[in-house]
Each structure stands twice: as structure tokens, then as C-alpha cells.
Image (cartoon, grey):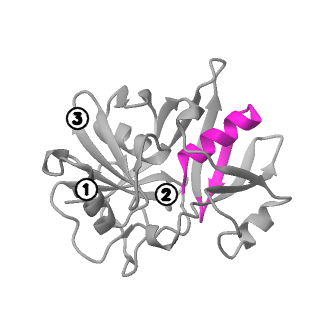
Amino acid sequence: MLAGTAPRPCPLSSRPGARQCLNALVNDYDVPRGIDVLRVFCGPDGRYGNALGVVRDASGHPDEASRQRLTRQLGFSETVFVDDPERGRVDIHTPGLRLPFAGHPLVGAAWLLDLEILELAVGDVFARQDGEFTWITARPEWAPPRTLQQYASAAEIEALPGPPPGEGRLYAWAWEDEAAGRVRARAFPRLGEESGIVEDEATGAAAMLLSAHLGRALNITQGRGSQILTAPAPDGTVEVGGRVLMAARG
């Protein structure tokens, strides 16, 4: 989050059956009209998850420059612009660049739009709802490249004071229970100070890459306590799923 952000509870009580998302973060100004703030990959108790801005009608931000300005203003690691809510055509931006694919924005958009297909320039992403989980299916090669660095224990992951030295996206992970497929992970974009993002709370694309690399389904605890589930398929795709909660509506 950008400087000036402060924690406050997310107003979930108006959504029937929703759990309170206790640590939702929004910027210290009111959410602009027409924008939803979601928490994607919340933990089993409804806490944590990665904040996501969704611009429900992107026609007011028709070009990349205007979308970048709004994305930087919101300060989330990613913001989704919905270009066609019926066809599921979406556009993903970070505070520094446009992304062809990203995991937590697409899981959040699939939950919000309640569609079976999301349209991206790289290809169609299939989505489904399964109880409290929203799943997307995509190809690992669509994800931005990153280093998958294994550590000896979950305790080492939790003890990291910040991004380890180096450049490029890093996914630091360790087994919590290898037989059960349980992983402890943290994600560091390492994109420079201008991005405003030091660490991603929950990263679906990185989880997808790790699942493809290991060739097995995973139950990942990332960041402070977000939960990401994965399941690789024989055709080379990987399904990524998690809980999504509404944090605020502008």
C-alpha cells in the first residue's frame, strides 16, 4: 500500500453470510464512485487476503495513461478495469505497468462478475464457484516470470525482514507439511521504490507457477495468513482458488 494507508474494518455486514474481514486496508480517503475494493485469498477466518480495486465501468478511463493514474491513486498492488462485464473482458494494472495476466485480480473479478469465462489478450481464463471458493484455470506461461526460492523451514520464511537482495519478482517458500502439500510462502515484487509495493499479501500467479513446478496440488499460506489453493491439470493448466470478500463499494 502507498504511504498514508491505515487499517480499518471492512463493511461486510451488508453482504448476507459474509465473514468480517478484520484487517481490510483501504486508502485514507473514500473509495471513488464506481470502484469496488475486494479482499482476495482471505484466510479460513475471513481475515487477510490481498486488496484489489475493481473499476466496474472502465469507459471513464479509456487509455493506459488514465488507468495508470487511477491505479497509482488507489495504491493497491493491482487494479482491474472491467471493459465488458457481460463478456468478462478485463484489463489489469499495477501502479507501474499493465499486466497481461495476474492471479488475485482474476479470482476477484470472477467472483464479482460471476462469469464462467474472463477474456484477456493472452487467452480465455475459465472460472467456477465451489462453495466459499472461487477458482480460475489458466496457463502458467501467462504469468510474469519470477524466482521460486525454497527455504529450509516455514520459520525461515516468517523471519524474513523484507525482500532478500536481488532483482525481479521473488516467491520465497518452504514446506509446512510436504506430505499434505501445505506450503508457507511470501512474495516480494522487487520492482523498485517507485512501485510502492514491497510485499504482496497473496499472489495467485506465483502460487500457480509453484504448483506447476512441483507438479502437485498445494495449500499455501502466504503473507500474514492468506490462503491460496492450487491444482495442476494433465493439460498443463493450473487451477487457482480462494475466498473473496467485499471490503468497500464506491
Stretch in magenta: 202-225
Secondary structure beneath label 3: loop
Q: Which kind of residue does numbered mark 1 sit on?
A: Ala
Q: Which numbered tag is attached to residue 163? A: none
| Left or right for 52, reference 169 | left
Decide: is 134 above or below 222: above
| Left or right for 138, reference 29 | right
At a point 21% along the width and 71% down the height, the residue shown is: 30
Q: Is residue 204 magenta?
A: yes
How packed mark 2 is, by other alpha carbons closer than 10 Å (few <14, some 14-19, many 20 or more), is many
Of tags 1 and 2, the one toward the viewer is 1
| Image coords of residue 33 (percent x, y) | 15, 60
Q: Which numbered tag is attached to residue 85? A: 3
| Left or right for 202, reference 94 | right
At a point 36% along the width and 26% down the height, the residue shown is: 117
Decide: is 190 above or below 2: above
How packed mark 1 is, by other alpha carbons closer than 10 Å (few <14, some 14-19, many 20 or more), is few
Which residue is more in the foreground, 65 or 182?
A: 65
Residue of label 1: 65
Q: Which kind of residue does numbered mark 2 sit on?
A: Gly
Residue of label 2: 49
Image quadrant where residue 134 sits: top left
- Residue 193 seen by the camera: yes
Q: Is residue 75 magenta?
A: no
